[in-house]
Image (tube, rainbow, N blue to C red):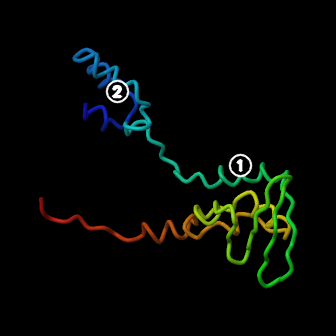
Amino acid sequence: MWSAVRATPVAGWERVMLRMKSLNEVSWKEMNDIPAQHWNKSHFRTYSKCDLQLVLEKNKKIIESWTPVWHGDDELAIYGVTNRNETYVVNLKQETCTCRKWDLIGIPCCHAITCIWQNKKQPEEYVSEYYRKTTFHKTYSHIIFPANGP
C-alpha cells in the first residue's frame, strides 16, 4: 500500500495498483474509492495551491447587485454597501467588512471589491501580504538543516 502512496509517476502508480488488485482486491477497491489526488503523490498538483485568483474572480462576478455609498471621511474611507435586502460596512483603510470574509481570509469580499472599484483601484492591491509572492519567498528562503536523532 505504501508503494502506491509514494509512487510519483502516474505509470508507476498504475503498475502498483494493478499489483495490489491481484494481491487484495478489497484493499484495491477501498483505495480506488478515494480520489487519488487526495492520497497519491503522482496525482498531487505541482503548481501553486493558493486559489486567490479564483476567489477574487468569483467575488468580482457577485458585485453587480451591490451598491457602494461613501460615508464621508476621506481619511477613514468608509462605505455602506447595499443590495435589496442587506447592508454591510466596508472600511478600505483598515481592510475590513462587516460580513467578516475579508477579515478572516485576507482576500477582499464582493462588498469590498465594489468599493475598491468605486475608487478606480484594483482588488489585488488590497489582498493580505500573506498571499504575496515576496512573502512566499521570504518564508521559504531559509535553509532547514536535518536534525540528528530518532
Closer to us: 72 or 44: 72
Q: Is residue 24 above or below residue 137?
A: above
Q: Secondary structure at mark 2?
A: helix
Closer to us: 56 or 79: 79
- Disc 2 marks a residue whose amino acid type is Met
Residue at 14 percent of width and 65 percent of height: 148
x then y, percent, for residue 34: 40, 29
Q: Is residue 129 above or below residue 1?
A: below
* 3D distance between C-alphas at marks 1 and 2: 33 Å
- Disc 1 marks a residue whose amino acid type is Lys
Quadrant where the image shows the C terminus? bottom left
Q: Earlier in the sequence, mark 1 or mark 2?
A: 2
x then y, percent, for residue 54: 65, 49
Closer to us: 6 or 75: 75
Which image quadrant for residue 35?
A: top left
Residue at 38 percent of width and 34 percent of height: 9
Quadrant where the image shows the N terminus? top left
Residue at 42 percent of width and 70 percent of height: 141
Residue that mark 2 sits on: 31
Mark number displayed over residue 82 = none
Say left or right for 68 vs 111: right
Residue that mark 1 sits on: 58
